[in-house]
Structures are given as C-alpha cells and as structure tokens.
Image (cartoon, rainbow, N blue to C red):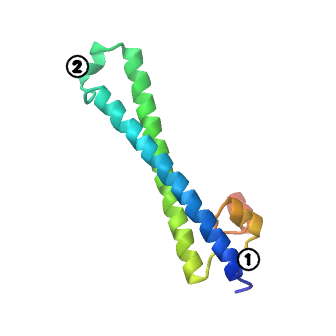
Amino acid sequence: MAKKYSKTKLKKFQKLIEEKMGYVHNEVETIKEGVGSATNKQGGLTPDSIYSNHMADAGTDSHEQEKNFMLMNRGSDYFGKLEIALERIKDGTFGVCNICEELIVEERMLEVPNATKCVGCKETEKLGL
C-alpha cells in the first residue's frame, strides 16, 4: 500500500463526514415527518378515500409519496456509506483506492468522502475496461 493521510487530515475528513451525516439525518427525518403527515391526512388511502377525492389529486399525492420514499431511501443509503467511511478512517484504509491501492486525491475525498476508488480506476470501471 502506498501512502496514507496524516492524522490531522483524517480528523478533518472525520469532522466533514460527521457534519454530512448530521445534515443527511436531518433531511431524512424531515422527509419522514412529511410522509407521516401525508399518510395521516389521506386517512390511510383506502380505495374509497381515493375516489372521494379528485383522481388527479390522488395521483399527485401518490407520486409525491413515492418520491419522498425514494429520497428517504437514498438518504439512508448515503448515511450508511458515510458510516462505512468513518470505519475506514478508524481502520486506516480511508482514502486508499480499493483497486490500485494508491492514495485518492484530497479534493475527491472532500467532495465524495465515501469514495473507495480513485478517479482513474472509477473511470476504467465505468467504461468496462
């Protein structure tokens, strides 16, 4: 394995990740609250309640509900990836490419702290080479 980030930089990354986790957690909780109130507002969305409202409104509500669930899942997945990044800081593998084992550039790690591949290896993987 090549280089590793210094303890100072790792602490900087850890702080950044923890801040992102707090933000993502708040976003997911806000979405959960919205999903809960929308479900309660519709009274459980039984077939009778859907037809008592305008069908277009029911369709819009259903679409918004699905979108919120998708955003909630996406946020939860990202939160999990950030938790794994914190574990990699602890075990000393943070910022090291899983493929070529070189140090991933700091700019990439600041923007995508859950990255496990350097830009070159990620591009090669995407192109299927």
| In the image, residue 58 above or below residue 127 | above
Amino acid type assigned to the residue bearing label 1 in the image: Leu
Amino acid type assigned to the residue bearing label 2 in the image: Asp
**In x, y percent, where is residue 114?**
60, 64
Q: Which mark is residue 116?
A: none
Residue at the image point whose x is 41% and y is 22% from the top: 59
Q: CA distance from mark 2 to mark 1?
A: 59 Å
Q: Which mark is residue 103?
A: 1
When asked about the image quadrant of residue 124, the answer is: bottom right
When asked about the image quadrant of residue 46, the answer is: top left
| In the image, residue 79 above or below residue 74 | below
**In x, y percent, where is residue 105?**
76, 70
**In x, y percent, where is residue 110?**
70, 63
Residue at the image point whose x is 41% and y is 36% from the top: 34
**In x, y percent, where is residue 83?**
51, 67
Which type of secondary structure does the marked residue at label 1 adopt?
loop
Q: Which residue is mark 2?
A: 48
Whether residue 98 can be seen here: no
Q: In which quadrant of the rendered image does the N terminus lie?
A: bottom right
Residue at the image point whose x is 52% and y is 52% from the top: 24
Mark 1 surroundings: few (<14), some (14-19) or many (≥20) residues within 10 A: many
